[in-house]
Amino acid sequence: MNNTSENVAAYNFAYLDEQTKRMIRRAILKGLAIPGYQVPFASREMPMPYGWGTGGVQLSAATLTPDDRLKVIDQGADDTTNAVSIRKFFEKTARIATTERTQEASVIQTRHRVPETPLTEDQILIYQVPIPEPLRFLEPSEVETRKMHELSEYGLMHVKLYEDIARHGHIATSYAYPVQVEGRYVMDPSPIPKFDNPKLSDCAAIQLFGAGREQRIYALPPHTRVVSLDFEDHPFDPSKADAPCALCGDTHSYLDEVITDDAGTRMFVCSDTDHCQTRRAAGHDKEDAA
Amino acid sequence: MHETTLEGGFTDAPRDAAHAFRACMNAMARPGRIETLRGATPPAPLSLAAGSLLLTLCDGDTPVHLTGAHDSQAVRQWLAFHTGAPLAATPAEATFAIGAWEGLVPLADYPTGTARYPDRSATLIVEMDALDTAGARLTGPGIASSTTFSVPDLAALQANHALFPQGLDFYFTAGDQIAAIPRSTQLEDA
């Protein structure tokens, strides 16, 4: 026990050194001042591999105060490896309280989902972002994509969505669906399902996005207007699996498809585990939808 | 060395700075809303809020431009001891600038970022006698419909917004109060 507390004392609050936090904090403020614009920052090596949320972890470390209650979700779930290890990381290095309840959390770090429960103005949502540049798969050069953002030259993105329609008859992009922020910057909302895109707009909480490997931070202040790109004759459709949750019967939440045997049997369950558990605790079950 | 130089920093730097940053972030994310910011006790004429903000955000990477009464030996030494931030001789070199509005203008001299990197711009900390939520009408990101805030020079801030996405970001401080108007905020006469 003594040994453990000595080890904990050896960490600065929330792991990062103060100079690093100041650098990240300045980037967050510039990101909030220019919504949707990707601010470069000097991303640090974290004690986890790139791709495991190092950008989100650095944002959390720079944002957390000792009074915060942290929730971490991975694809909506609180109990997956990534979520559990990041939660434990901050329990150990910042000694802060954690929770699995969306309403109780003041800071929520997320990988690829926005919680079903509407967020409040006392909450901060921190996204883990793999590729922050929405144009990257269309234009590999950072010099070129910077120029495209400078000139608001987003025709290439519309061509990409049009090609979806030409090939599939509808816009087949189903996650990391590009959005435009306040009519200016086109932004990657991180690989959230497009079902979650409408939750980004006019959200009461501060939303921060961190890409560790790509060394970019961007942000949405509360009540920012965020529009998913579309066409007049092919309007944006925040689709989800057409089924109720097999556990709580919710017909409005985003669902995961779970294969239950090797004969092709499947079930659809809420991706947001807290949402599903809260509903079941309140007496809802799969009969609800019937 | 001034007698107050070594005093007045954060007592528990990581935790005090975390609380202070939360106030700075909430202010910048919700333009015109007044937040409470304390932690540092800087030498006069620095306000508690401005001193805490400098300790939270400034270090060797951020040249600070002091203007007017804030360009005193006591403030210089306090800033140097607690943050290590170099002094910017001219506004053009500044990452942060601090002073009363009359000392900070003209705004045209500060870096507003480039078209490709609009984040490479200065943040101005305007020391005020008091913060007042009656005044110009603000709209834009961070504001649900509209809000009001008293600004020292409406035309100058409107001109700054017209540069968006380039431009300057402003903190207004008085005592332990802080509010912000980033470049994204539209202002009009209420």
Image: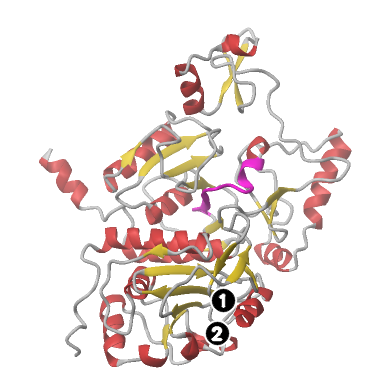
B86 relative position to B183: left or right: left
Name the residue nearer the viewer: B50 or A78.
B50
Residues at marks 1 and 2, common chain?
yes
Q: Quadrant of the N terminus of chain B?
A: bottom left
Q: Secondary structure at mark 2?
A: loop
Q: Secondary structure at mark 1?
A: loop
Do we see residue B184 in this rendering? no
Check the image and report above or below for A20 versus A50: below
The amino acid type, in three-letter code, at marker 1 is: Leu
Do we see residue B127 in this rendering? yes
Q: Quadrant of the C terminus of chain B?
A: bottom right
- A210 in the magenta segment: yes
Residue A67 is situated, as x and y percent measured from the top left of the image, at 31, 48
Name the residue nearer the viewer: A204 or B85.
A204
Q: Which residue is label 1 attached to?
A: B168
Chain letter, disc 1 residue: B
Q: Which mark is residue B110?
A: 2
Q: Which mark is residue B186?
A: none
Residue A243 is situated, as x and y percent measured from the top left of the image, at 67, 18
**Magenta-highlighted residues:** A197-213
The residue lying at 71 percent from left, 61 percent from top is A184
Chain letter, disc 2 residue: B
B85 relative position to A165: left or right: left
B168 relative position to A4: left or right: right
Decide: few, some or many residues near mark 2? Use Cα within 10 Å; few <14, some 14-19, many ≥20: many
The residue lying at 31 percent from left, 40 percent from top is A97
The amino acid type, in three-letter code, at marker 2 is: Tyr
